[in-house]
């Protein structure tokens, strides 16, 4: 949202860290990022260990706030749809998650 980017190192196949143009508390508001993801999990997979067989689809929407290159706060909303092979176990789940991360 604020124009920063995450560097990609093709030699190692890794992403670097986001470096805000101005760190929070030093005359700036840090960096802001919006994220979205869709995923599908097949519980029928041969390695899955679960009494509930079927699939789980979920959509995640998130906002990440990078206070500085070493700290970020992540807010996520996840909507999950469970489609089991038995109708008794079908349903939806709504989750709100937050995480504070510091790395050096």
Image: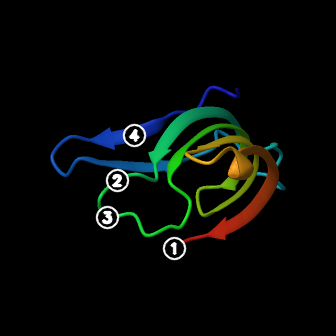
Tell me which label, 4 or 1, sits earlier in the chain: 4
Q: How far from the left and from the top, in percent, is residue 2? A: 70, 28
Q: Is residue 30 visible?
A: no
- Residues 13 and 16: in front is 13
Name the residue located 84 percent from the left edge and 56 percent from the top edge: 25
Name the residue located 51 percent from the left edge and 47 percent from the top edge: 54
Q: CA distance from mark 4 to mark 2?
A: 35 Å
The image quadrant of residue 9 is top left
Tags 4 and 1 touching, CB below 8 Å? no
Q: How far from the left and from the top, in percent, is residue 24? A: 79, 52
Name the residue located 67 percent from the left edge and 55 percent from the top edge: 68
The image quadrant of residue 91 is top right
Residue of label 3: 47
What numbered label is drawn on residue 45? 2
- Disc 3 is placed on an element classified as loop
Q: Which one is in front in this view, the residue at disc 2 or the one at disc 1?
A: 2
Tell me which label, 2 or 1, sits earlier in the chain: 2
Label 3 Cα neighbours within 10 Å, binned few <14 / some 14-19 / many ≥20: few
Q: How far from the left and from the top, in percent, is residue 46? A: 29, 59
Tags 2 and 3 touching, CB below 8 Å? yes
Tell me which label, 4 or 2, sits earlier in the chain: 4
Residue of label 1: 104
The answer to whether residue 98 is left or right of residue 53 is right
Tags 2 and 1 touching, CB below 8 Å? no
Q: How far from the left and from the top, in percent, is residue 53? A: 50, 54
- Residues 98 and 71: in front is 98
- Residues 47 and 21: in front is 47
Q: How is the image coloured?
A: rainbow
Q: CA distance from mark 2 to mark 3?
A: 6 Å
- Disc 4 is placed on an element classified as strand
Q: Which one is in front in this view, the residue at disc 4 or the one at disc 2?
A: 2
Residue of label 4: 7
């Amino acid at each position: 949202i604020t124009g920063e980017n995450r560097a990609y190192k093709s030699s190692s196949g890794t992403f670097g860290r986001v470096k805000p143009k101005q760190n929070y508390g030093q005359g700036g508001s840090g960096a802001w990022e919006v994220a979205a993801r869709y995923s599908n999990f097949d519980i029928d997979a041969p390695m899955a260990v679960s009494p509930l067989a079927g699939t789980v689809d979920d959509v995640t929407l998130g906002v990440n706030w990078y206070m500085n290159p070493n700290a970020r706060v992540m807010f996520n909303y996840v909507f999950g749809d469970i489609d089991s092979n038995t109708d008794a176990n079908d349903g939806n789940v709504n989750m709100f998650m937050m995480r504070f991360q510091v790395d050096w």
